[in-house]
Image (cartoon, rainbow, N blue to C red):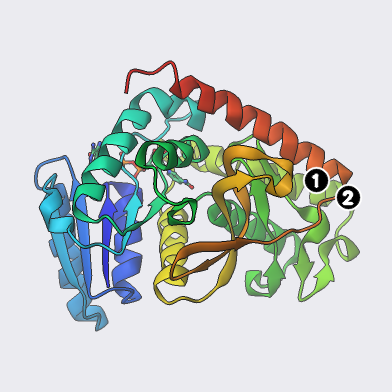
């Protein structure tokens, strides 16, 4: 198994590090346009491996796509992150050109790869990668919902004073502060609805904290977060390469599912060796479906911006 991570910045390097530590592949390639960055971070990870008993070949590459040849899975994190006060959507002008170019370069050397898109605005970048590559829809997967669900579980566990490991909770819809939908009705503590333990006001606060989870960190750190995003990317990759069939909310191309078409949006999908394998219907109630439709409208507006860009 060979996995390439494009972008050796905060998220890409953390993702590659998690992939290596979990030994998800025999070879991990880290690629960046900044001279020496991926080689340096790759070497640092290799040295960490000797301490952690990981046996993975880690190769750094300054924009040399030949080194990525034959990758089974490619994670795209290249692009600019947001700064305090910025929305993810403001990144589109720069990141669209980067994601499109990287996808083309990767495909020249790894025609069978499964793509995991992390660069923001993620739902639109996933749609762009799908449309520009012409690949089968199951091989293009956007990572956002796994991270947002981790944030949802974090705030739930703090409110419930419980272990996050005993929680089941999903965030679907767009990966944006106003477009994501924490499914509070369906969240459970060991199978019991969290609404049995938390009042509506507390649950509302958990949901709103989740939605601005990324912005809260960006304000604190001065740039967007990387530990949880990198880990979320690695967990997604793990389900693919180990064919685990885990159920995670990911941004995938919809053709009528959840009432939407011709859009990539976060829905619960089963992830296995062929990419995303099926979409699971959570039977949204009227209010949740209305929120999903509103989220789709916002993401569709962002997708329309692609047509105005010269990429
Ligand atoms: N989907 C999510 O849940 C999620 C979470 C966090 C961050 N993000 C997004 O991930 C992206 C990366 O964030 P970050 O914090 O790692 O940023 P970063 O600035 O630390 O790293 C980005 C890296 O991409 C590289 N790069 C730029 N153009 C490139 C190209 N054409 N080819 C190869 N590499 C290129 C840069 O040199 C840089 O090292 C941002 O768009 C950010 O908004 C998404």
**How packed is label 2: few (under 14 Cα within 10 Å), some, or many (20 or more)?**
few
In the shown orientation, is residue 230 left or right of residue 276? left
**How packed is label 1: few (under 14 Cα within 10 Å), some, or many (20 or more)?**
some
- Secondary structure found at label 1: helix
- Secondary structure found at label 2: helix
Does the residue at mark 2 contact the one at mark 1 (Cβ under 8 Å)?
yes
> Would you place residue 207 above or below residue 233 in this image?
above
Q: Residue at x 32, y 58 (%)?
A: 113
Q: Quadrant of residue 265?
A: top right
- In the rendered image, residue 74, in percent from the top left (x then y), is placed at 32, 56
Q: To which residue does mark 2 refer? A: 200
Image quarter (top left, top right, bottom left or bottom right) of the N terminus = bottom left
Q: Nearer the viewer, residue 110 or 41?
A: 110
Q: Residue at x 26, y 41 (%)?
A: 104
How far is the residue under mark 2 from the one under mark 1?
6 Å
Q: Nearer the viewer, residue 218 or 282?
A: 282
Q: As drawn, which residue projects farthest toward the bottom?
A: 53
- In the rendered image, residue 296, in percent from the top left (x then y), is placed at 66, 34
Q: Is residue 142 visible?
A: no
Q: To which residue does mark 1 refer? A: 204
Q: Specify the quarter for ligand 1.
A: top left
Q: Is residue 29 visible?
A: yes
- In the rendered image, residue 165, in percent from the top left (x then y), is placed at 63, 74
């Amino acid at each position: 198994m060979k996995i390439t991570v494009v972008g050796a910045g905060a998220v890409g390097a953390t993702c590659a590090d998690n992939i290596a530590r979990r030994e998800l592949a025999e070879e991990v390639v880290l690629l960046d346009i900044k001279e020496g960055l991926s080689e340096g971070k790759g070497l640092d990870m290799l040295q960490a491996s000797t301490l952690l008993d990981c046996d993975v070949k880690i190769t750094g590459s300054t924009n040399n796509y030949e080194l990525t040849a034959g990758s089974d899975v490619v994670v795209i994190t290249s692009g600019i992150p947001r700064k305090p006060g910025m929305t993810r959507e403001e990144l589109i002008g720069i990141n669209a050109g980067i994601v499109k170019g990287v996808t083309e370069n990767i495909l020249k050397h790894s025609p069978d790869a499964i793509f995991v898109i992390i660069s923001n605005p993620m739902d639109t970048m996933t749609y762009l990668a799908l449309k520009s590559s012409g690949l089968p829809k199951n091989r293009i997967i956007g990572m956002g919902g796994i991270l947002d669900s981790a944030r949802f579980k974090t705030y739930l566990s703090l409110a419930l004073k419980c272990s996050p490991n005993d929680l089941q909770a999903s965030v679907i819809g767009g990966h944006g502060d106003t477009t994501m939908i924490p499914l509070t009705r369906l969240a459970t503590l060991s199978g019991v609805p969290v609404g049995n333990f938390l009042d509506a006001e507390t649950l509302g606060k958990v949901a709103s904290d989740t939605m601005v989870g990324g912005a809260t960190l960006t304000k604190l750190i001065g740039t967007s977060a990387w530990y949880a995003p990198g880990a979320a990317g690695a967990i997604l990759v793990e389900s693919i390469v180990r064919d685990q069939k885990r159920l995670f909310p990911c941004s995938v191309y919809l053709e009528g599912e959840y009432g939407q078409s011709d859009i990539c949006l976060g829905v619960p999908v089963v992830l296995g060796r062929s990419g995303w394998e099926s979409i699971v219907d959570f039977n949204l109630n009227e209010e949740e479906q209305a929120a999903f439709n509103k989220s789709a409208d916002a993401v569709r507006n962002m997708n329309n911006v692609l047509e105005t860009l010269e990429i």
